[in-house]
Image: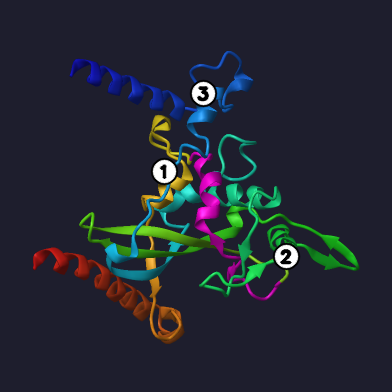
Amino acid sequence: MMRKLVNSLCLLIGFTVFGQVNLINSDRPEEIGVLSDEQKEMFSEKKFLEYPHVDEKDIMWSKVVYEEIDLSEKFNHPLFFPNDNLYDSERRSLWRTIREAILADQIDVIYLDNNNKFRYVMPLDEAKKKIQNTVSINGTDKSEVLKSSDISYYRIKGVWYVDKRLGEMRYRLLGIMPYGKDINSKQNKEPVPLFWLWYKDLRPILHEQLEFVDKNNANRINFDQLLTSRRFTSRIIGIDNVFDDQFVEDYVSDPFMQLIESERLKNIIRDFEQDLWSN
């Protein structure tokens, strides 16, 4: 028993040291933020927790849900900060991580923004042009890379389901779409949808990037853990319905009433779980 306790403490200490990204063990200042071979192995794509296979006959209830993650909310700041020009490699925002992966051709398939069911693929060159915001001025192409500060929010698609074999309700994130500014439009200041990304394609990339925690550097998790464990705040903007997954904004025009409708949709999921175990 004592040996197990000691091993657990050693493992916890190991995770704590790794969480500081080579800060304590660096021999030279330039080594800070550079992962050792042991850390690279720990954070390699082999290590992230694979989604378990769920047998269709074990799903007794499910509901596809669309949500909006507002990056201006304080609880979501780990996804928004730090700014791109502060750090070279160690600390990245979620958008910078995604942007650099696309520009480096680490993501093979990107989907059109008006495509909630991921049926239509966007050419990679078109996606890169959106990221680089290429505009033609007097016959000359000018590019302005879309920065983290240009991203206002993310729209995500996921599914809540009840696994009767495990006897619990679970969540599976399916896709994510960033909304950012469009420098080609001088009149429209509203953020525009960029593209949908299938979340399973992103997992190996997000697994390698730690989010920054203001309160405790030793308690850092990667972006994949943050998103799959739902450590963010969001509002529901739609659930699957007979109108081809019509969003709240499509049938409710008043912003305040949209919030009321969002709360009603949230209660549909919450009430089902409560009623499931109360009977």
Label 1 or label 2, whichever lies nearer to me, is: 1
Question: In the picture provided, is 168 more to the left or to the right than 114?
Answer: left
Q: Marks 1 and 2, Cα distance to the nearest angstrom?
A: 32 Å
Q: In which quarter of the image is the C terminus?
A: bottom left
For badge 2, the amino acid type reads Glu
Above-or-below relation of 128 to 86? below
- What residue is disc 2 on? 126
> Could you classify mark 1 by the number of other residues whose Cα lies within 10 Å: few (under 14), some (14-19), or many (20 or more)?
few
Question: In the image shown, does 255 or 230 lie closer to the viewer?
Answer: 230
The range drawn in magenta is: 185-210
What kind of element bears circle 1? loop
Q: Residue furthest left?
A: 279
For badge 3, the amino acid type reads Glu
Above-or-below relation of 138 to 217? below
The x, y position of residue 122, in whole percent, is 67, 67
Q: Residue furthest top?
A: 27
What kind of element bears circle 3? helix
279 part of magenta stretch = no
The x, y position of residue 197, in whole percent, is 56, 60
Q: Which mark is residue 38?
A: 3
- What residue is disc 1 on? 49
Q: Earlier in the sequence, mark 3 or mark 1?
A: 3
The answer to whether any part of residue 36 appears in the image is no
Q: Do the residues labelled 1 and 2 touch (CB within 8 Å)?
A: no
Above-or-below relation of 92 to 242? above
For badge 1, the amino acid type reads Leu
